């Protein structure tokens, strides 16, 4: 799923951390980084974070409730 306009990065990663299953960031090269890993969170921030917001990410979640949680975050903030 594409995730856009993340304005509160800490809150976004808090939602990711609350997911039960794996949540992965898909890089432009097709690599997948485990977003529940703090190291991967920092690496992803260093590569795509600019001006206090993340414009767009492609993420993959494997559990239905995690997908619902992430979609709810994107809709309701």
Image (cartoon, grey):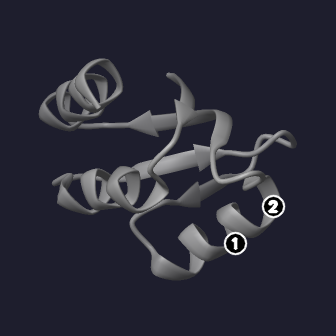
Q: Which of 76 and 48 is in front in this view?
A: 76
Residue at (40% x, 62% y) in the render: 10
Residue that badge 1 annotates: 43
Query: Label 1 to label 2, Cα distance in Å?
Result: 6 Å
Give the x, y percent position of residue 39. Answer: 57, 81
Residue at (48% x, 55% y) in the render: 9
Position of the C terminus by quadrant = top left
Characterize the local packing of mark 2: few (<14), some (14-19) or many (20 or more) Cα atoms within 10 angstroms.
few
The image shows residue 56, relative to residue 43, as above or below, that is: above
Give the x, y percent position of residue 6. Answer: 52, 38
The image shows residue 46, relative to residue 22, as above or below, that is: below
- Total marks shown come to 2
The quadrant where residue 70 appears: top left
Give the x, y percent position of residue 12. Answer: 38, 50
Q: Which of 28 and 77 is in front in this view?
A: 77
Give the x, y percent position of residue 65. Answer: 12, 32
Residue at (50% x, 22% y) in the render: 1
Q: In this view, does 39 lie to the left or right of 45?
A: left
Q: Is residue 50 left or right of residue 19?
A: right
Q: Nearer the viewer, residue 21 or 3?
A: 3
Residue that badge 2 annotates: 47
Characterize the local packing of mark 1: few (<14), some (14-19) or many (20 or more) Cα atoms within 10 angstroms.
some
Residue at (47% x, 36% y) in the render: 60
The image shows residue 13, relative to residue 37, as above or below, that is: above
For residue 20, the mark is none
Task: Say if mark 1 contacts mark 2, CB within 8 Å.
Answer: yes
């Amino acid at each position: 799923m594409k995730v856009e306009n993340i304005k509160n990065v800490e809150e976004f990663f808090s939602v990711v951390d609350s997911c039960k299953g794996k949540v992965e960031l898909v890089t432009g090269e097709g690599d997948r980084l485990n977003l529940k890993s703090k190291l991967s969170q920092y690496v992803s921030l260093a590569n795509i974070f600019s001006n206090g917001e993340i414009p767009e990410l492609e993420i993959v979640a494997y559990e239905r409730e995690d997908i619902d949680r992430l979609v709810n975050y994107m809709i309701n903030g």
